[in-house]
Amino acid sequence: MNKKESYTEYGYRGLEEIKHLREEIKLLKEEVKLMKQAQVLRKENRNLKKINKNLKSLP
């Protein structure tokens, strides 16, 4: 294998790795988005529980 063929092979593997990393970044961004949504929903749930508790304590 000469230097040019080796470079092409490594270049190809590098491109494949970049594609893989981009896909992984995309998935991680989606996961972060879902985690933020879950955090907001947990906060809303806590607030609703407090409101419910306050309503139950009214005469």
Image (cartoon, rainbow, N blue to C red):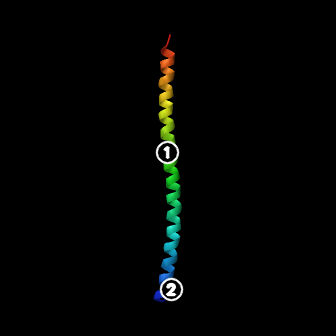
Between label 2 and label 1, give the one nearer the viewer.
1
**x, y (%) of residue 52?**
51, 22
Q: Amino acid at mark 2?
A: Glu
Label 2 belongs to which residue?
A: 5
**x, y (%) of residue 43?**
47, 34
Total marks placed: 2
| Residue 25 in the image: above or below residue 11 | above
Q: CA distance from mark 2 to mark 1?
A: 45 Å
Mark 2, residues whose alpha carbon is within 10 Å: few (<14), some, or many (≥20)?
few
Element on which disc 2 rests: helix
Label 1 belongs to which residue?
A: 35
Q: Amino acid at mark 1?
A: Met
Element on which disc 1 rests: helix
Q: Which label is found at residue 27?
A: none
| Residue 53 in the image: above or below residue 43 | above
- Which of the two labelled residues, at mark 2 and mark 1, occupies the earlier sequence position? 2
Mark 1, residues whose alpha carbon is within 10 Å: few (<14), some, or many (≥20)?
few
**x, y (%) of residue 49?**
50, 26
Determine the residue positioned at 48% across, 19% down. 54
